[in-house]
Image (cartoon, grey):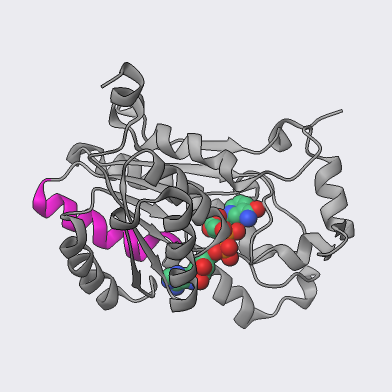
Amino acid sequence: MTYLDEMFGLDDKIIIITGGGGIIANAIAEGLLKAKAKVIIWDIVQEAIDQTIERLTEITGEKNNVKGLIVDTTNEESIEKSINETEKFFGPPNVLINGAGGNRGKSAFIDTNISQFEFVLRLNLIAGLVVPTKAMAKYWIKKNIKGSIINMTSMASYVPLSGVWAYDASKAGVLNLTMATAKELAPNGIRVNAIAPGFFVGKQNKDLLIKNEKTGELTERGQSIIQRTPFGRFGDASELIGAAIFLISDMASGFITGVSIPVDGGFLVDCI
Ligand SMILES: NC(=O)c1ccc[n+]([C@@H]2O[C@H](COP(=O)([O-])OP(=O)(O)OC[C@H]3O[C@@H](n4cnc5c(N)ncnc54)[C@H](O)[C@@H]3O)[C@@H](O)[C@H]2O)c1
């Protein structure tokens, strides 16, 4: 085994990715499989799971190392059952990537649709962090597994993005809870970190960013993001893989907990 395999190889990792059928989770899963991890895709949509597994198998050839399970991560009962089901695939999972999340709609604050606001809070905070983290950490503590969690923060965790108020509030909450749970779970040897993607075209934000998929013409908001991203482009989801492997590898990041790594083409350091 080379030094780099030892440092970054993930052959001892059994990784659950929630929202695993999404654009970002798909790309990260591909990298994890190439780094020899076992990956279990959790998603609320069966079709998204099937397509993901087909794509990952085709690209990586790791048919035996990727499985899928339909799970609603807002549902506590279903999560506990799903962890037990997941265990049957490859043994006890030791990494959780909280990839479920996203935004719905955009409006002036005074036109906020409260039920949509509640939906987005629930999606990012409850489905995207609280329920899976609670169940997984409880399971790890009981089994004395020193697991590790990666949450999905956002540029909105640091600076509010106009029009997506619930997304802003929930992603600020995800950053806060990343730090809070890192402290809470550190005595159990459980690490909690986050990746803060800049702007990547996903299912949930496509309509906000792209006006015409055929020509690639951007919306006004899409153009404004590109202008404020020093690298002058959206990210490619594959550019998130390195941060994920780094945060999962105990040898590379075993003393790191409670951090959020921006992968944003410089969006957060944009200034005049
Ligand atoms: N795309 C971006 O530019 C960007 C930027 C910053 C942060 N993020 C965050 O990264 C994460 C993934 O984003 P994406 O763009 O890949 O999203 P996406 O919409 O492509 O994928 C999200 C996936 O989550 C699944 N999901 C939704 N609710 C669920 C539930 N209750 N249980 C299980 N699965 C559920 C959906 O079916 C979907 O497959 C989100 O938290 C998002 O907020 C994305």
Question: What is the span of residues highlighted in magenta in the rendered image?
Answer: 128-144
Question: Measured along the vertical axis of the image, is residue 222 above or below residue 71?
Answer: above
Which quadrant of the figure contains the N terminus?
Answer: top left
**Looking at the image, which residue is at 30% across and 28% down?**
254
Residue 240 location, quadrant: top right
Tag count: 0
**Looking at the image, which residue is at 59% across and 39% down?**
239
Question: Measured along the vertical axis of the image, is residue 21 above or below residue 261?
Answer: below
> Where is residue 55 shown, x and y percent of the image?
49, 60
> Where is residue 245 shown, x and y percent of the image?
41, 36
**Looking at the image, which residue is at 28% across and 60% down?**
134
Looking at this view, name the residue that lies furthest to the top.
Answer: 3
Q: Is residue 169 visible?
A: no
Magenta-drawn stretch, dominant element (helix, strand or loop): helix
In the rendered view, does 242 fall on the left or right side of 148? right
Q: Is residue 129 visible?
A: yes
In the rendered view, does 190 fall on the left or right side of 253? left
> Where is residue 169 shown, x and y percent of the image?
60, 59
**Looking at the image, which residue is at 20% across and 62% down?**
89
Residue 129 location, quadrant: bottom left
| Residue 137 drawn in magenta | yes
| Residue 176 drawn in magenta | no
Residue 214 location, quadrant: bottom right
Q: Which image quadrant shows ligand 1?
A: bottom right
Which quadrant of the figure contains the C terminus?
Answer: top right
> Where is residue 11 shown, x and y percent of the image?
26, 39
In the rendered view, does 119 fall on the left or right side of 202? left
